[in-house]
Image (cartoon, grey):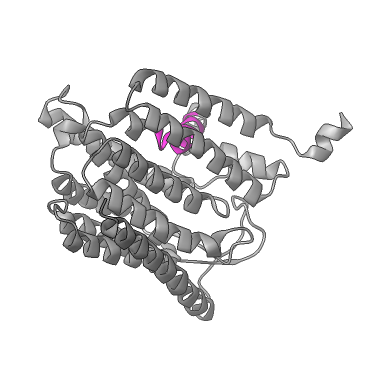
């Protein structure tokens, strides 16, 4: 067995993680001097100002790592440079939004352009739906789902550690499914590099966080993860592509649906997500983030199982997410339980 590619990827992941850690440290110092803080308000889950903008470190590292991987891979994803162009556009607009809020219409316009570029890089959009839908219907459905996922990932970035944990889980989960399923090597290499870079960021974002991702991090990161999930589905692992992000999608979608039912603005910032309620109930950021990690481990196992039994795995994933949301809703501190 030739171990050279595996050792090369391991070294590249170590470099990506180390580069993100180092770059994030520099960004913390720079943004502190510039006084670019996320200041607490009624919708915040933190009580002190924190630097925001870690995406300025994370996203360039991922872009460089993916560009390097495209050179290294024997069969790189076609048109990957278009995906990176979309990534750069989102990073610029999101950073402007971090500095001085950009109107929703312009943010959505930038996301639409980035998704259009990403669709070209996707290669076979119709394959995402297993050929069940014609191309003229598959493309707009993917575009809407892509924009939705980008915003879900941004909405869910509300406590220390959660986005880093989710990015690592999705990256490793996609890489594992690709490896077990014998899929294209890019679907193993690219998510592994993303997970490694996210780990470098998480070292600074774990509670108590020194820095937050900011929109400049969460929006482009959601964009790349969505592309990887669509690629996974297009290569036949459609059930795994639904299972891996199931917790984030469930928490965000149920919360937004409840807000819409109550006729509350769904696009306004709030702290009504299930994981935020658990923090408000007295559980620490790190405990809730670890619980999310545990749920994701179960979903990764079910995603691997879906390669053999897709429908049973999907049903078990739905049950897992439902029970986890209920647990977050009812999770009380030990002191309260002891007083019952």
* Residue 125 visible from this viewpoint: yes
- Picture coordinates of residue 24 (x, y %)? 46, 70
Numbered label tally: 0
Q: Magenta stretch: give its range.
A: 243-257
Picture layout, residue 34 above or below residue 125 = below
Q: Position of residue 135 (x, y in %)?
A: 11, 31
Depth check: 269 or 164 in front?
Answer: 164
Q: In this view of the protein, which residue sits in the foreground, 202 or 265?
A: 202
Percent position (x, y) of residue 226?
Answer: 31, 44
Location of residue 65 with respect to 241 vertically, above or below? below
Q: Is residue 244 magenta?
A: yes
Q: Is residue 110 above or below residue 339?
A: below
Nearer-the-camera pick, 164 or 186: 186
Q: Tell me which corner region of the image, top left, top right, bottom left or bottom right, holds residue 131.
A: top left
Q: Is residue 331 left or right of residue 335?
A: left
Is-magenta flag for residue 78? no
Q: Quadrant of the C terminus?
A: top right
Please indicate, yes or no, whether residue 213 appears anywhere in the rendered image.
no
Residue toward you, 213 or 64: 64
> In the image, what residue occupies the spot 33% across and 60% down?
7
Identity of the residue furthest to the front in this view? 1
* Residue occupying the point 21% across, 28% down: 129
Residue at 36 percent across and 19 percent down: it is 311
Main secondary structure type of the part rendered in magenta: helix
Q: Relative to 168, is 98 above or below?
A: below
Whole-percent x, y for residue 72 in the image: 19, 62
Q: Please report the residue visible at 38 percent of the width from the left and 32 percent of the height from the top.
A: 304
């Amino acid at each position: 067995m030739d171990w050279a590619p595996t050792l090369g990827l391991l070294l590249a992941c170590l470099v990506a993680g180390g580069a993100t850690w180092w770059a994030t440290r520099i960004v913390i110092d720079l943004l502190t001097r510039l006084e670019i803080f996320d200041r607490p308000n009624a919708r915040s889950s933190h009580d002190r100002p924190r630097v925001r903008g870690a995406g300025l470190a994370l996203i360039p590292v991922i872009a460089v790592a993916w560009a390097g991987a495209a050179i290294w891979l024997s069969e790189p994803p076609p048109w990957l440079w278009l995906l990176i162009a979309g990534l750069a556009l989102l990073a610029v607009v999101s950073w402007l939004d971090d500095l001085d809020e950009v109107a929703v219409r312009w943010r959505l316009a930038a996301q639409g352009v980035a998704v259009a570029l990403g669709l070209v890089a996707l290669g076979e959009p119709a394959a995402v739906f297993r050929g069940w839908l014609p191309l003229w219907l598959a493309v707009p459905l993917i575009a809407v789902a892509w924009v939705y996922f980008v915003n879900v990932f941004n909405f869910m970035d509300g406590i220390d550690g959660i986005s880093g944990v989710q990015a690592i889980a999705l990256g490793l989960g996609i890489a594992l499914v690709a490896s077990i399923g014998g899929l294209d090597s890019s679907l193993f290499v690219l998510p592994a590099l993303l997970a490694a870079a996210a780990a470098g960021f998480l070292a600074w974002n774990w509670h108590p966080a020194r820095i937050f991702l900011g929109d400049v991090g969460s929006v482009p990161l959601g964009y790349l993860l969505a592309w990887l999930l669509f690629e996974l589905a297009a290569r036949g692992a459609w059930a795994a592509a639904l299972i891996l992000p199931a917790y984030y999608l469930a928490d965000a979608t149920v919360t937004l649906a409840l807000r819409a039912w109550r006729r509350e603005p769904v696009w306004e910032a709030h702290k009504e997500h299930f994981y935020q309620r658990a923090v408000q109930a007295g559980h620490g950021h790190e405990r809730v983030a670890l619980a999310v990690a545990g749920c994701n481990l179960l979903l990764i196992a079910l995603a691997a199982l879906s390669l053999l039994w897709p429908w049973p795995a999907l049903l078990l994933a739905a049950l897992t997410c439902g029970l986890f949301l209920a647990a977050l809703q009812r999770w009380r501190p030990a002191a309260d339980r002891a007083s019952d």
